[in-house]
Image: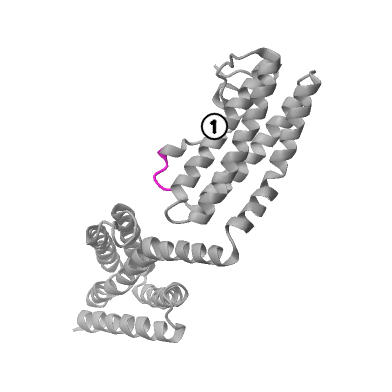
């Protein structure tokens, strides 16, 4: 059972603060280790923050020893009501740069609130003084971290790391997602519109469109996941890429299939054609934004391919 913060004694408050500072220092050490390979300059920032937390712990321990002796009871955040439950760092398979920065900010804010509240609970002047000092240190920690970041992470390094993060995002998310979206949007056009013009039935076109979209999603998902394991290419976990690719493939096909929920065949076909135009425009924009392809060139390549498949479906269905 967790204990209420109001029930803690001065001894227990100091013991909790010591444990919390040790935990925060070790978390920053985990952050530094996780970021070292990809973002060495940012890793150095967290190593220095770890050193600051260790210094806070030393000051708390010195005061505790003067007041209560050598034995420190093991009191952790999870033993006291009111603290945020944190997911263990070691359970996280990958730690992104923005993720750890946000978590560090959250940790500092929570710790500062703890020190401010703890300072109001003690009657000992020395303990209150130290807790107040540490609260100010945590308040200044964000600024200090920014100062550390400026020295350890100059503009050119920050640009390199931002570029590296962008490359990873493109390799692991944009490329498989875009490949899936293009395949789903384009490859399903022929069977969908062939079925639509052959049967003149919205229901039949809807069934064929759903089947083509789901089938293409499964096929593309497996193909992407089995293409490589990401160990050499840096494209990330194959399962994640396969899921992204498969879902985007299915989404690309479902988009122009849903209009055939409209019973009137001619209205449904008109809406489906409009959706196709929007899909091709979106694909062109994504290629231009993330793949460094000029917008006009991307639009020409995608639209020409899409129109050819669209016409093939109409001609086959009307034959």
Q: Confirm whether the magenta stretch covers residue 128.
A: no
Residue 257 seen by the camera:
no
Pick the residue in front: 266 or 209: 209
Q: Main secondary structure of the magenta part?
A: loop
Using the image as rendered, state which of residue 82 and residue 11 is in the foreground.
11
Q: Position of residue 176 (x, y in %)?
A: 34, 64
Q: Quadrant of residue 248?
A: bottom left
Residue, x 48% and y 66% (percent of image)? 163
Residue in the picture at 38% in, 75% down: 276
Is 178 in front, or is 18? 18
At x 18% / y 84%, what residue is drawn?
319
Q: Which residue is mark 1?
A: 23
The location of residue 191, given as percent across then percent down, is: 24, 72
The answer to whether residue 68 of the structure is visible from this angle is yes
Callout count: 1
- Measured along the vertical axis of the image, is residue 212 above or below residue 134? below
Q: Could you tell whether 242 is left or right of 54 in the image?
A: left
**Quarter the N terminus occupies:** top right
* Helix, strand or loop under label 1: helix
Q: Is the residue 110 above or below the residue 301 in the image?
A: above
Which residue, as the protein is rendered here, is positioned at the far left? 319
Q: How is the image coloured?
A: one colour
Residue 92 falls within the magenta-colored stretch: yes
At horizontal 28% and vertical 64% (from top left) the residue drawn is 213
| Percent of width and height locating residue 214 | 27, 60
With respect to residue 311, does 169 lie above or below? above
Stretch of the chain drawn in magenta:
91-95
Q: Is residue 290 above or below residue 21?
A: below
Number of residues whose C-alpha sits closer than 10 Å to that of mark 1, classed few (under 14), some (14–19) or many (20 or more)? some
Q: Quadrant of residue 66?
A: top right
Taking the image as shown, residue 285 lies to the left or right of residue 5, namely left
Residue 172 picture location, percent across and down: 37, 60
């Amino acid at each position: 059972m967790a204990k209420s913060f109001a029930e803690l004694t001065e001894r227990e408050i100091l013991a909790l603060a010591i444990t919390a500072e040790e935990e925060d220092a070790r978390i920053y050490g985990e952050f530094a280790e996780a970021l070292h390979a990809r973002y060495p300059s940012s890793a150095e920032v967290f190593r220095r923050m770890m050193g600051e937390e260790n210094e806070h712990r030393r000051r708390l321990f010195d005061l505790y020893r003067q007041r209560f002796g050598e034995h420190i009871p093991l009191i952790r955040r999870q033993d006291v009501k009111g603290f945020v439950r944190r997911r263990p760092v070691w359970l996280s398979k990958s730690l992104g740069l923005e993720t750890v920065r946000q978590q560090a900010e959250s940790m500092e804010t929570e710790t500062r609130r703890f020190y401010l509240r703890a300072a109001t609970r003690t009657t000992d002047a020395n303990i209150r003084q130290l807790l107040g000092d540490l609260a100010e240190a945590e308040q200044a920690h964000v600024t200090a971290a920014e100062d550390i970041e400026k020295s350890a992470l100059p503009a050119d390094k920050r640009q390199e790391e931002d570029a590296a993060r962008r490359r990873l995002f493109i390799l692991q998310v944009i490329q498989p997602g875009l490949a899936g979206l293009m395949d789903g949007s384009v490859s399903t056009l022929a069977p969908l519109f062939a079925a639509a013009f052959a049967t003149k039935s919205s229901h039949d076109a809807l069934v064929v469109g759903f089947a083509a979209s789901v089938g293409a999603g499964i096929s593309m998902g497996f193909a992407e996941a089995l293409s490589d394991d990401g160990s050499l290419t840096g494209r990330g976990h194959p399962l994640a890429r396969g899921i992204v690719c498969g879902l985007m493939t299915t989404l690309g096909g479902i988009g122009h299939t849903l209009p055939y929920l409209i019973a009137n065949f001619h209205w449904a076909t008109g809406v489906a054609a409009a959706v196709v135009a929007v899909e091709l425009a979106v694909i062109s924009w994504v290629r231009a934004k993330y793949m460094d392809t000029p917008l006009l060139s991307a639009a020409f390549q995608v639209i020409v391919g899409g129109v050819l498949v669209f016409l093939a479906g109409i001609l086959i269905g009307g034959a």
